Image (cartoon, helix red, strand yellow):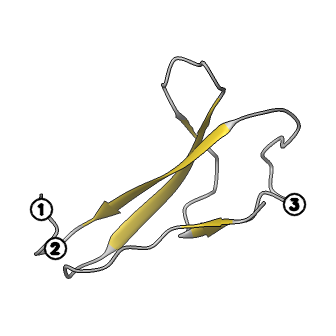
Amino acid sequence: MFATGSVTGGTGGSTYQWQWDTPGGSTAFANISGQTGSAWNPTGSSFNTTGTYRIRLNHNRTGSGCGA
């Protein structure tokens, strides 16, 4: 598995944090330690990939043109 995220529009910087939860979990996603890039390949990471998980990318964009 390999995952990536991107954004278009606006100006300024971005911060990324990959997060995990279990299916049917409390929806309180937890940060995956050290995974702060726009792309993540769990192979070789400290994340235990045995089992079923929900993975998401929390992407914060700063600057102008980024509001809803």
Dot 2 corresponds to which residue?
A: 63
Instruction: Indicate whether 53 appears above or below 17.
Output: above
- Callout 3, which amino acid? Gly
Identify the mark at residue 44; answer none if there is no mark: 3
Instruction: List x then y, in percent, for residue 49.
Output: 84, 43
Query: Are the residues flagged by discs 2 and 1 in contact, CB closer than 8 Å?
Result: no
- Callout 2, which amino acid? Gly
Q: Residue at x 11, y 74 (%)?
A: 65
Q: Residue at x 12, y 62 (%)?
A: 67
Element marked by disc 2: loop
Q: Residue at x 65, y 25 (%)?
A: 23
Identify the mark at residue 36; answer none if there is no mark: none
Q: CA distance from mark 3 to mark 2?
A: 34 Å
Residue 52 location, quadrant: top right
How many numbered badges does the structure rendering display? Answer: 3
Instruction: Indicate whether 34 appears above or below 11.
Output: above
Counting residues from the N terminus, which is met first, the one under dot 3 or under dot 1? Answer: 3
Q: Is residue 29 left or right of residue 40?
A: left
For label 3, the crowd category at 10 Å Cα-Cα, with few meaning under 14, some 14 to 19 and many 20 or more, is few
Q: Which quadrant would the N terminus be assigned to in this image?
A: bottom right
Dot 1 corresponds to which residue?
A: 67
For label 1, the crowd category at 10 Å Cα-Cα, with few meaning under 14, some 14 to 19 and many 20 or more, is few
Residue 63 location, quadrant: bottom left
Image depth: mark 2 or mark 1 in front: 1
- Callout 1, which amino acid? Gly
Counting residues from the N terminus, which is met first, the one under dot 3 or under dot 2? Answer: 3
Element marked by disc 3: loop
Q: Is residue 60 left or right of residue 36?
A: left
Q: CA distance from mark 2 to mark 1?
A: 9 Å
Instruction: List x then y, in percent, for residue 7.
Output: 36, 73
